[in-house]
Image (spheres, rainbow, N blue to C red):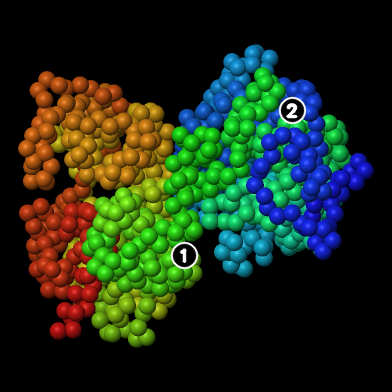
Amino acid sequence: MIIPHRTSNACEFVHINEKEEIVAQHERFHLHTLNDLKEKLKELNVFLPLSEDQNVMFQKVKIGWKETPNRYAIHPMEGFDSDIQGAPTDLAFRRYKRFASGGSGLIWFEATALQNECRSNPCQFWIHKGTVDAFKRLVDETRKAARDTFGQNHNPLLILQLTHSGRYSKMDEKPTPIIAHHSEVLDPLHKLPKDYPLISDEELDRLQDQFVETALLAAEAGFDGVDVKSCHRYLLSELLASFTRENSRYGGSFENRTRMLRETAQQIKENVPGIFVTSRINIFDGIRYPYGWGVSKENENIPDLSEPLRLISLLKDIDYPIMNLTIANPYFNPHWGRPYDFPIVGGSVPDVHPLEGVAFIINTIGEIQKANPELPIISTGFTWLRHLMPYAAAGAVKEGMATLVGQGRGGFAYPDSVKDLMETGRMDPQKTCVTCSGCTQIMRDGLNTGCVIRDSDIYGESYRDALQHSLNYLIREASRCRECEFPNCQSGCPADVDVPGFIKAFEEGDIKKSYEILKNNNVMPELCAYVCPSEVQCEQYCMETIMNGVSVPIREIQKYVARRARELGYVTAKLPEKANGRTAAIVGAGPAGISAAIKLLEVGFIVDLFDKAKTTGGTPLDVIPAYRLSIDNVLGEIDEILKLAIEKKRLNFINGFELSPTQNLDTICRKGYDAIFLGIGLGKSQTLPNAQRPASGVEDALEFLKRYKRRIETSVPSRVAVLGGGNTAMDAALSAKRAGARDVYIVYRRSFEEMPAWLKERDHAMKAGVHFLILSQPLDYLHENGKLTGLEIARTVLGDPDRSGRRRPVTIANSESVLPVDLVIEALGQSPVEAIEKILPGVELNDKGFVKVDNDFRTNIANVYAGGDLINGGTTAVQAVAEGMKAAISMDKNLLY
């Protein structure tokens, strides 16, 4: 173990012999006074600079041609609260205005992507020509908040961190790592094969130009400086450790490994006037050589600062006026990267005392500052000290171990800490960060990020939701299952899954058995766990709901089991050694069609799977927003199941095929299949009756959701109305809100009680600020020159129930009014496609226009079966899966006799 100790005037890193000295174990924060802190440091034999003189922290600091009003800084902590285009939302404006009015002299704005492809989260900041005006407003309002609080002479320095997420990049919620070298340490964590491609030198050359273009936009927005991010294993940080990158201008030698950072910074300096360039840099990775930077070749826990010092010397020559230094990666190496009191959900605490980690970080950065006394350096690692942080901050500055002191998590929790220090000389211990790791957990879950404890009204629910995903919590909850002999929960599941059976296996730690029990009745358990309304299905009927008011979390346990089974390689179709000689055509690759295909493959059929799309997954893949169902969840499960069948040529996926009057069911029948399954869904969206639709400003909900999910022209105007009260309407409303609409209205002609959307989806929309106009009948569209200007609506009262079983809305005479909106999204339901009689010639339909089937899911045409929305009008994914499986079982059975 490496512990910083005081020897004369320098901090040395001494390897403690555990036989000679007791090594302190992890301990939670129990320090009240400065004297308590001194005593604990003495007990641990650890050095940390301390001073009671706070005046030094309120001196101005010259940074290039600018100066900061004090020595406190806010670190670049990501809130993941941009809109889909990367522009800051109201939540982001709130955060930075709080930082500014809280008194910090320097605000280092969070990681902001150069390109959509290199964002680590769909809500990560992304500055480009379409969002630069929003960033300019953010800068202006941040400066104004500071001046309004402290006067016109208080001008915090504002720096924007520019990032390429590298191996943490995601596209459409799916990890798409971009790596600079292969690492025996990191590649397994990201499940990267040995032949996974590296970013090329040519791509890195072009990326330098992208940094310059983005820096120009940052200057246009009004930032004082830009940070070429080189820390925490993101792309430029990884390049610094690319010792094993061969035959490359960006790997191997020190000169090559630092080239990207040096040349990019030089280009920004030369081509972007009025703004300075700097970096937040890792000076020690804590990853073994040759995969880590700044580490001893003999021991990854010991820093070797020779290369970081050499790089900093070169960056000073490029006129870096300030640097922000950090240590390790807080999520990979929490011992030194981020001391905390509580583990990330499902994790474990470090095996060292947090003060050792605090001292390690502050003293290591202190060595760099002492070697470069003329260069302002921002230090980090103070948060665990809570209200005692100012003493260490002042101590580091007075000892020449830092010029400024940054707060990361501490700033999230206590944005006005510097203001309190100005006014009272102390920090309030009941406002400080408690290093609970809550902000880390919701960040890792891809949600808006902030302080769970001190800002709980906004972030508390996100954390509680995240808690439901942790293994320890789920095992504890699984133990509440009563293992009923005739379980109500099973009868509430459309697929008749043995719920107690899979939960018991999970509780016993047998993921494989648990998954096999799930898959026996539901071949797509991961998909269904994400999109089905468990609260009105299995969980509603759980005995614990009746006895204790809270169900066993069946959905969350199913999510965990299905995901882990996929990660462990248990998800696959179990094919017989030989095909049985029969063939089947499946038309439609949604949940019903895929489920039918899997069941048929497992009894030996050779299957042709037809779909108009290029990928499998159907409507859930296309339209359910990524925050509810990512493409990775759908395709990951489907791909793993079907991979073996495709390899063994038992399954052919024929995309680009769509049934039509000229390419109809007869086309399929003539191919001579033994059986055919129709899972084509409905396909026609209903529109507002008798309304005059303008040329622009009205859009079908499914088309809008497809665009939103694929990030195709996803900008929306300020005012949006969504017609309808189902889940699709809720998804469209939330997506419009996330895409940047200020006001989104759900316009629904009945009351809340009649609203078909699941209660949970309604709650999400309400909490997001969606307005609900219930008992409101949409009548017509108002428009000028073909452009929508408003929605005409009327008030309603409820009459007697209609054939749907819900009370019929009755329009109130003379109650018409106009809702001014710029976009209307119609989510009024689906119906069978036009000319379905010609598309499915001879197939009998029921009085609602849906395909009519018997109890075996057979149509009136021999060996033609159907399931899913085409027969039921649209219910849940699990019902579609169940119908596809049951139809396949019937197809196999009926062909035998």
Asked which quadrant contains residue 323, the reply is top right
Question: In the rendered image, which quarter is residue 297 located in?
Answer: bottom right
Q: Is residue 873 found left or right of 650 in the rendered image? A: left
From the image, tell me which residue sits under label 1. Answer: 564
Q: Judge the density around disc 1: few (<14), some (14-19), many (≥20) Cα neighbours within 10 Å.
A: some
* Image position of 803 with respect to 397: above or below: below
- Decide if residue 116 is in sight here: yes
Is 387 situated left or right of 437 in this image?
right
Q: Name which of mark 2 and mark 1 comes first in the sequence.
A: 2
Q: Estimate the x, y position of residue 881 in percent, counting from the top left.
A: 27, 63
Residue type at tag 1: Arg
Residue 634 to residue 306: above or below: below
Q: Where, quadrant-wise, is the N terminus in this rendering?
A: bottom right
Residue pictured at 37% horizontal, 44% vertical = 707
Q: Which residue is mark 2?
A: 71
Residue type at tag 2: Arg
